[in-house]
Amino acid sequence: MNFFTHVGKYILTLKGMFTKPENAKMYWKELMQQCVDIGVGSLPIVIIISVFLGAVTTVQSAYQLVSPLVPLTAIAQVVRDSVMLELSPTVTCLVLAGVSGSKIASELGNMRISEQIDALEIMGINTKAYLIAPKILSAIIVIPFLVIISMMLAIWGGRTAGELSGIIPTATFDRGLQEGFSGFNLAFSLIKAYTFAFLISSVASYYGYNVKGGALEIGKSSTSAVVVSCILILFSDYVLAALLL
Amino acid sequence: MIRAVNIKKSFGDKTVLHDISAEFQTGKCNLIIGASGSGKTVLQKLLVGLFEPDSGSIFYDDLEITSMGDEERKLLRQQIGMLFQGSALFDSMTVEQNITFPLDMFSKMTREKKLLRVNEVLARVNLKDVNKKYPGEISGGMKKRVGIARAIVLNPKYLFCDEPNSGLDPQTSLLIDKLISDITYEFNMTTIINSHDMNSVMEIGDTILYMHQGFKEWEGTKKEIIFSKNKLLNEFIFASEFLQDAKEMRMIEAAKIRG
């Protein structure tokens, strides 16, 4: 299948979601379930990655900013802005593309291969609306929260690493965090988080929903979903930076 | 009654169904038989609306499904039950949740009434003490029965079964066949079964449609099939020597009766 066929099918898959729910209560239940799966399910890995991202950024910034002319508070500013502008939204979402994206693709792929999607269709349920829409919506709800949690933990990790390694005292770090803070950076970070959340969930759903073949194809579609999501995340990361910064 | 009129279907350059017309009667087990690749699964998927025909029409009583909008089709589908070849049970749900699912989605019953209905259909398919089990914890025959229970929980008018006996031992196959035919007569449903199991054909096939390479090759009843002169049909149903012997014996018996 060529690129344009994929894009066309992707758009048609998303278009098919917009119908009146057969039973709003069941859709709500599915949405909550997906929020738990994507949000709570990914929280441990997000916590671990974020703390170490912040810690490493502190140590490496201190290593590079060795001039006596550069105040210590600059380390905190570098950590804060790196984490907010790039590390938390982008790296967290790249990891989520692997964790949640592959889960979504393989779950839908398995449902397709084992005819569970056909069974839902026969019952008179719009499977795109019932299976895909809650996944995309829950990702859009939950992933920005994960990114915010990641930012806080990364900054805390950087602060703790600075104190433990004797690079920067916590009081100086805290002062540095407040210097030259721009609220737009937070807004930019959230714009990225929403964009990446949509990409991760919709691309994974597209690949999973349209699987053809057997168990081997489920694995292939899952891999394709992760690879394509990662490429789109990085591409849109550049586009957003070029447009908004 | 379900009626297919001049159905054609192709995938790419390959035509898999050539101008098929057939009638599937209410209150009867209508079997579609044929070798693998003969087009019977495609025909069933067209009948149920999972595929769209390239040309031709499909009628459910007087309603033409091929010209229906999505919303009309959704309403019609609530009157359709289907048993899939692999049962297609939702593997993250228990047996009870699987059967309750259509009720949750389409009925306004109370929780207690839903449970009563679930237990009623489970009893109808001779299953007990499986409510809290997951599909992965029950046997293939039980999965089929749960699939039937889920298919009939909304009292459908039409029942489709795709290879209901595949992967089952002969004894369980007979039980599933009997169950499907009993349910068909009991609820006066239009049942369409895809099969290549000759036991099923002879046990429950009230009407039989034989497909060969995308063409409707023969149709009739189980009484007629044994005396059919159709070469392709005979090659298909009497493929084994055992059945060939059985056929010869039956022909001799029939000749004796006729005097």
Image (tube, helix red, strand yellow):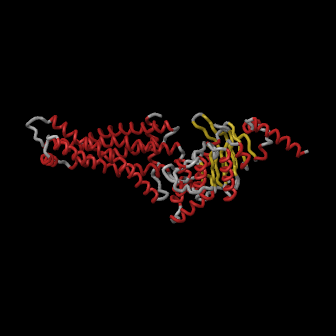
Q: Can the viewer see residue B216? A: yes
Looking at the rendered image, the quarter that the C terminus of chain A falls into is top left
**Position in image of residue A184 (x %, y %):** 22, 48
**Position in image of residue A190 (x %, y %):** 28, 48
Left or right of residue B256, residue B10 in this image = left
Q: How many numbered badges does the structure rendering display?
A: 0
Tell me which residue sits at (25%, 47%) in the image.
A153
Q: Relative to B102, say whether A41 is above or below.
A: above
Tell me which residue sits at (82%, 40%) in the image.
B249
Q: Can the viewer see residue A137? A: no
Pick whichever, A13 or A202, lies toward us: A202
**Position in image of residue A122 (x %, y %):** 56, 51
Pick whichever, A222 or A63, lies toward us: A63
- Taking the view exactly as shown, the residue that stands out farthest to the left is A69
Tell me which residue sits at (49%, 40%) in the image.
A211
- Taking the view exactly as shown, the residue that stands out farthest to the right is B259
